[in-house]
Amino acid sequence: MAGTKFAYVRNFELPDPLLPDVFLVCRLDGHSFHRFSDEHGFVKPNDERALQLMDHAAKSLMSEYNDIVLGFGESDEFSFLLQKRTNLYNRRHAKILTTLTSYFTSCYVFNWPRYFPDTPLRYPPSFDGRIVVYPTEQAVRDYFAWRQADTHINNLYNTVFWALVQQGMQSTTEAHANLRGTVSAMKHEILYSRFNVNYNDLSARFRKGSVVVREEISPPSEPKAQNSSAEKPSRVKKKVKIRTHVEILHCDIIGDEFWGARPNILS
Ligand code: ATP
Ligand code: ATP
Ligand code: MG
Ligand code: MG
Ligand code: MG
Ligand code: MG
């Protein structure tokens, strides 16, 4: 096919490499999920099935792409951290972004019936995506802290808002108006005094979001050889392959504990 008189058009395709040696964060977000969640009857403020479906798609993506070392999700969004030294698709920006976004979206649609068996898809959902490069470990930690803080702020607001609407019989306009200017402590107070809800008792999935990590599987202990004296000690040191599996947690990622226990994420 090369060598035709048309082939010159290929030269209009410009390389789009991402900077070497920097962390890559890819964030996907559901397109118009305000509408999508309405049309598919998501429970407000938090539809557990929808969150589990997002987690499932994230897990599938991380199982497919080993260079993703961390995922964090809330609502209709997920962020994925790629190893600093990843050479995935030679760090081509569009190739990475489009394949990750497309694979995640397919997994979301593919697994939809498992989480919404009684709700057929009314139209195909889609996700937008972006990749941001972060040069330092601190910036990566601050990025994930920013997303988890956002989860908290949104969830607190949405929890009070929907309590006022669903149980307090307020219109959405009234509920928004009532919450305007309230600080966090006041929202906790409204929840507790009016609805007898202790915010901290809500599911950690709602309060903390979903953290997707690769956890090491401890290797099965090697069976002892019967007559080990007969064996020559092997001079070739076996390379120990660390096996991992992708796991979902709902834990704090703002403090040091999470990162201290997983130094590999930022290495
Ligand atoms: P955009 O295309 O700009 O992202 P959007 O309508 O998707 O627009 P977002 O800011 O991404 O806006 O907000 C997503 C909305 O989807 C939330 O406000 C919420 O209404 C809804 N939503 C997403 N996930 C859930 C869920 N698990 N349970 C209930 N509602 C959800
Ligand atoms: P990449 O991920 O780099 O695109 P690829 O395997 O998709 O790798 P392409 O150059 O895009 O490589 O080629 C797509 C291949 O898919 C074709 O070579 C062909 O083998 C197969 N293919 C695609 N569509 C059809 C089709 N309709 N019928 C038969 N084979 C097809
Ligand atoms: Mg948005
Ligand atoms: Mg969205
Ligand atoms: Mg969103
Ligand atoms: Mg192809």
Image (spheres, rainbow, N blue to C red):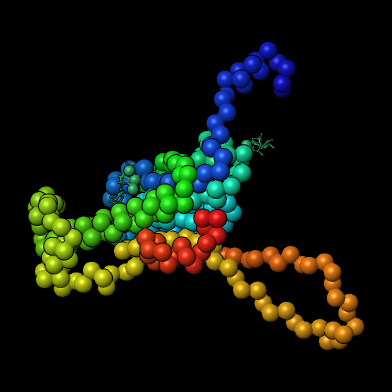
Percent across and percent down for residue 229 are: 87, 85
Q: Residue at x 83, y 87 (%)?
A: 226
Q: Residue at x 51, y 55 (%)?
A: 266
Q: Is residue 201 visible?
A: yes
The correct choice, above or below, for 185 with respect to 218 in the image is above
What is the quadrant of residue 12 in the picture? top right
Percent across and percent down for residue 243 are: 63, 66
Q: Quadrant of ligand 2?
A: top right
- Residue located farthest toward the bottom when viewing the structure as drawn: 226
Q: Is residue 175 visible?
A: no
Q: Quadrant of the N terminus?
A: top right
Front position in the image: 70 or 23: 23
The correct choice, above or below, for 13 with respect to 17 in the image is above
Percent across and percent down for residue 240 are: 70, 67
Front position in the image: 171 or 245: 245
Q: Quadrant of the C terminus?
A: bottom right
Q: Residue at x 61, y 73 (%)?
A: 218
